[in-house]
Image (tube, rainbow, N blue to C red):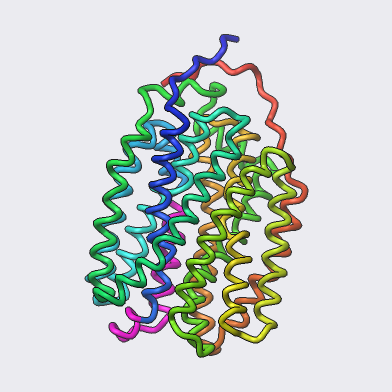
Amino acid sequence: MTPATTAPRLSMTQVLLCGAAIVTLSMGIRHGFGLWLQPITMDRGWTRETFAFALAVQNLAWGLAGPVAGMLADRWGAFRVLIVGSVLYALGLVSMALATSGLAFTGGAGLLIGIAQSGTTYAVIYGVIARNVAPEKRSWAMGVAAAAGSFGQFLMVPVENWLIGGLGWQNALFLLGCAALAIVPLAFGLKEPAGAGVHTGPAQSVGAALREALGYRSFLLLTAGYFVCGFQVVFIGVHMPAYLKDQGLGPEVATTALALIGLFNVFGTYAAGVLGQKLAKRHILAAIYLLRAIVITIFVLSPITTWGVYLFAATMGVLWLSTVPPTNAIVAQIFGVRYMSMLGGIVFLSHQVGSFLGVWLGGRLYDTTGSYQVVWWIAVALGVFAALVNLPVRETAIPRAEARPVAA
């Protein structure tokens, strides 16, 4: 067999700086969407389920479009996908501001922004990282990118709250639409040389790669665990502000709590990336999910106080997106980097199905029962389930014949 052609690489520093900035914007904007629940539903006269359903569709659209965006990024490069994603993000935010019906709101906040996020967040960025960062530094680099998304939450949530209070919720969305377009110039920093990634890895078609992954037990277990991650974090991120207001706490408590989640997740995701270089990643994932279940249980059973909320937010922050680096690093470790963005998108689809159910069930069960309690306990049970399914995951690479050049 002929050895694979070494594709030209981008500078690791350049990839991390531009990738981290893009994730900061994309994830930072979306993390504050829960702040719009009450002003929009009150102004438009909608139920919470109407708002929650739109964001549920957003998460599902993000997940469904993820493998397609990843496949396009693997084939044609991340640059073009990021440009399209940036424009769709801006259009979706403007549509959120202008929508006067639940259907129109779902089209903007749900479909447009969901598709936009599939092309501007982790799956696409991690594909570039995997192709341009050496394997021994890959988990760490993914931790840096995930920490950037967490910093975006810490940075953007207070900014978005200030914009809503100072400019009104509609003008705030218009301004965020302009901010989403800043992804366009940053995408130039991730424009890989022609042919990058095309000659990386074994001579394998897209269909063969999909069949191989979907027929591999560890990939399916990893995917099942990621479903739980989506359910938990999106339910909390979207519904916690309203939950805290129902408990008699002021809106500033929710804003501070969301910002604390973002701040402490900077440390949690970075630590997960570093630990992934030294420990079995499946053990890291099992520990994260089990600790989430314990933390949520303590929070639900304890009296709701301002400082109790802050402690919960800080603890959950450490565990928030810390699943992202080890999950994606395992995918790259098992299957290689040739179809990293696409396979990462497949795993993320499961995450987003969980996100859909978490945000929609939160609104649905609240409107039905007048309480979020049932959903909190579902989140606890799922955390235990995810811990158990990650333990038997095998992290070793699938044995293959020596890599050879892949036809463009």
Q: How many marks?
A: 0
Q: Quadrant of the C terminus?
A: top left
Magenta: main secondary structure: helix
Is residue 255 depicted above or below 123 in this figure? below
Left or right, 402 with reference to 95: right
Q: What residue lies at 52% left-to-right and 53% top-to-bottom?
A: 349
Residue 69 appears at what percent x and percent y? 41, 43
Is residue 222 depicted above or below 134 in this figure? below
Tell which of 284 and 66 is nearer to you.
284
Quarter occupied by residue 389: bottom right
From which residue to which does the magenta span run? Answer: 39-64
Q: What residue lies at 41% left-to-right and 66% top-to-bottom?
A: 157
Quarter occupied by residue 187: top left
Residue 20 appears at what percent x and percent y? 44, 45
Report whether residue 221 is seen.
yes
Is residue 43 depicted above or below 147 in this figure? below
Tell which of 290 and 11 is nearer to you.
11
Q: What residue lies at 42% left-to-right and 81% top-to-bottom?
A: 48
Tell which of 354 and 127 is nearer to you.
127
Q: What residue lies at 68% left-to-right and 83% top-to-bottom?
A: 302
Residue 119 appears at what percent x and percent y? 39, 47
**Is residue 57 shown in magenta?**
yes
Tell which of 261 and 377 is nearer to you.
261
Left or right, 330 with reference to 367: right
**Is residue 330 shown in magenta?**
no
